[in-house]
Amino acid sequence: MSPKSKPQVKKVVLAYSGGLDTSVIVPWLKENYGCQVVCFCADLGQGDEDLNGMEEKALNSGADEFVIHDMREEFVGDYIFPALKAGAIYEHKYLLGTSLARPLIAKHLVDVAHQTGADAIAHGATGKGNDQVRFELTVMALDPRLQIIAPWREWDIRSREDAIAFAAKHNVPVTATVKSIYSRDSNLWHLSHEGGLLEDPWNEPEESMYQISASPEDAPDEAQYVEIAFESGDPIAVNGEKLSPAQILSTLNALGGHHGIGRVDLVENRLVGMKSHGVYETPGGAILHYAHRELESLILDHETIAFKQIAAVKYAELTYNGLWFTPLREALDAFVNSTQVPVTGAVRLKLYKGNIISAGRKSPFSLYREDFATFGEEDVYDQSHAEGFIRLYGLSLKVRGLNGLPVSGLDMPKPDYSKFKRD
């Protein structure tokens, strides 16, 4: 982008993590846009280690102001739990840890811009990834008047070495080194790993890479039971203790991680068209998804479960692609919430060396009837009625067989077209 094409910006709110990229963006923005910079930090449960000293670091990097919001309860209650109730999992494995966080961060970026009188927001997402789309679509939806600055699509920095050199030139305090291996994203829902050995999908992830989950081999030799209570689809208690949404997730992260639960190795399709290889640690998320499915199996009817599985795929795609603040996602939430009204009860699970094993489920709204399911009771189910049902259910197959047509439909006989000639 040439200097003439740059938008006129007075104050910008930067999504700030304190890492190498966002640290060098601060002086870059001031140098290239001549604007004030507000560093906004989102506390999503990434841990005190990442948050300690962040304000000092931001100000030492040249920021004019630093703002931090504790968004842990909002993140879990308003973003993670809705996706959990929807059953949203991207490409069978990814529980959308980064995807769910980005629209929330962008929402707060817009709020901070309004509060501080900023006329632009900036982010450190690269031009190859999904996050640029998630941030910018949210800003466009919530306040299209705000300018959006994406330094990775403008500057000459092309590597970590370039960024470290820029930081040194501008006296930016960073701890990153050229030897750093993995790119990570951390929040209450997950910890992701990309880069390093993972750039070759043939490589097995090294054990030292994992940070919040034990290897199944090193997990305890004795299983541990956990009971999770739900009310209208929302988790409300663990082992009989009522907890807030963030507390529930923190508790299950610790339990699951201890037993090697929730490791995912995935080659995924990015929205921008390329594939990427990542490894995710989602111990609490894996437990909650498993428990929620178990409870739904007891309560929801076949047709609702079947259609909800279709909706779950679309819900996951919308979330992954940055389309959280859209009419369709809101409409899907309305459908999901209507299905979740009776999803109240408890699920007992056994955690053992990376495995989640069902150990019991109960609900006052269960559709399971022992007297209907048993083979011995004739007063609730007359087995002779099955004959008529089967005759009607298989009628099309019977007609096909009587006409001598193959079941697969592949080697269909050629019709005698002479029979269709008009006189």
Image (spheres, rainbow, N blue to C red):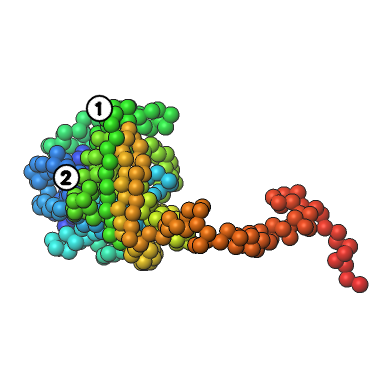
Residue 332: image quadrant is: bottom left
Q: Secondary structure at mark 2?
A: helix
Going 10% across and 46% down the picture, which residue do you hit? 55
Query: For the residue marked with disc 1, what is the amino acid?
Result: Lys
The residue wearing badge 2 is 27
Going 31% across and 50% down the picture, which residue do you hit? 347
The residue wearing badge 1 is 179
Q: Position of residue 262 (x, y in %)?
A: 32, 39
Query: For the residue marked with disc 2, what is the amino acid?
Result: Pro
Residue 398 or 107: which is nearer the viewer? 398
Say the numbered circle drawn on residue 43.
Answer: none
Going 47% across and 58% down the picture, which residue do you hit? 372
Q: Position of residue 46 (x, y in %)?
A: 20, 44
Residue neighbourhood size for the residue with mark 1, other residues' Cα within 10 Å, grouped as few (<14), some (14–19), many (≥20): few
Image check: 273 left or right of 216?
A: right
Q: Earlier in the sequence, mark 2 or mark 1?
A: 2
Q: Position of residue 116 (x, y in %)?
A: 13, 61
Residue 401: image quadrant is: bottom right
Residue 253 or 323: which is nearer the viewer? 253
Image check: 208 left or right of 339?
A: left
Q: Secondary structure at mark 1?
A: loop
Task: For residue 132, say whether it is visible.
Answer: no
How far is the residue under mark 2 from the one under mark 1? 24 Å
Residue 169: image quadrant is: top left
Going 79% across and 54% down the picture, which residue do you hit? 404
Q: Position of residue 109 (x, y in %)?
A: 21, 57
Image check: 204 left or right of 161?
A: right
User: Which numbered disc, 2 or 1, marks the residue closer to the eye?
Assistant: 1
